[in-house]
Image: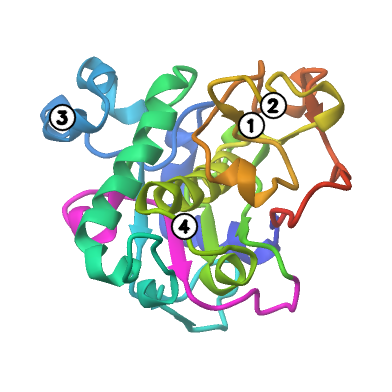
Amino acid sequence: MTLGGHHYFRLAKRLGVALISLVSTTGCGTISTDPAAVRPLAGKCSRLASANPENTMLIALEWGGGTSGIYPAEILDGIDLSAFNLQEGGTLADRSELFEQRLTDQINQIYCDWQQINVLVLNGNDVNFYNADTKVLLTQAVRPDGRMDIGEAEYDPCDVQRDNDAVIFGERIRQLAGTYTFDEWVNVFANVTAHEIAHTLGYAHISRENRPDGPGAPYVELMLDRHTMKEMRREHRFVAPQTNCPNETSAFLSAGTTRDTDVSFSFGR
């Protein structure tokens, strides 16, 4: 995760004095003051149809590459779906439109079930007319700083900022993964992306010593650190009681990286 000073400067430059009126425990960028702007998007999560638009966070998935507030000096390539092989034959590139839609829907389902916070995730092309301050850049690159994490986000305790960024590193995922089914690839990318989004909203990692799920549970806890690829191919949800404010931290939360001998990778922090 990143708490760099460049981020606060970028935030102030973008929002200026308007920042004071936007700070809340659930806000990100406002979509509109008109509830009608949310209703066409509510198919992603029906409970948001009656939600206060000012407290609904709009998050854009960017596929074509570009820059991120985490690495403002770097131009990152877009994701290369042809690098991810399918057990059915071919690659994700052969079903790219369906993959993007299924990925978006899966992330929205994770957050729709987690009713503590209102989130709508859309593909970048779908948010041109909305004020989406939070951006998730899906890139084929690895981390520019040389670390081998599969994702990174601007960690934002209590969700006090309005324009946090996250990056998903496709090449590192490819290196760790094998040839999966289409549905398994949807789960892998949705789980990584939803995990990093959660950090931008203020959620920390869950300690494995107190993990609330297990092999027989229907879901894997989304905020576990150092997942195995086997875990990542399953559906994830928020399972443990969690908070996004450090001064209210649950016993389940871990401030540091938890070690486990049966893991393949860790998330960036």
Q: Single out the residue that lies furthest toward the front.
A: 88
* Residue 209 in the figure: left or right of residue 49: right
**Residue in the foreground of this view, choosing between 149 and 179:** 179
Name which quarter of the figure residue 204 lies in.
Answer: top right
How far is disc 2 from disc 4 in space, using C-alphas?
Answer: 37 Å
Residue 227 at what x, y percent from top left?
70, 45
> Relative to residue 185, is residue 24 depicted above or below?
above
Residue indicated by mark 4: 180
- Give the mark nearest the N terminus, 3 or 2: 3
Q: Which residue is mark 3?
A: 34
Instruction: Please name which of the two marks, 2 or 4, marks the residue nearer to the observer.
Output: 4
Instruction: Choose the circle earlier in sequence order: 2 or 4.
Output: 4
Marks 1/3: CA–CA distance: 26 Å
Asked if the residue under mark 3 is in contact with the one under mark 1, i.e. CB atoms within 8 Å, the reply is: no
The residue carrying pointer 2 sits among few (fewer than 14), some (14 to 19) or many (20 or more) residues within 10 Å by Cα, namely some
The amino acid type found where label 2 is placed reads: Cys
Q: CA distance from mark 1 to mark 2?
A: 4 Å
Q: Are marks 1 and 2 in contact (CB under 8 Å)?
A: yes
Stretch in magenta = 122-147
Looking at numbered disc 1 in the image, what kind of residue is underneath it?
Answer: Cys
Task: Inspect this view and state whether residue 33 appears.
Answer: no
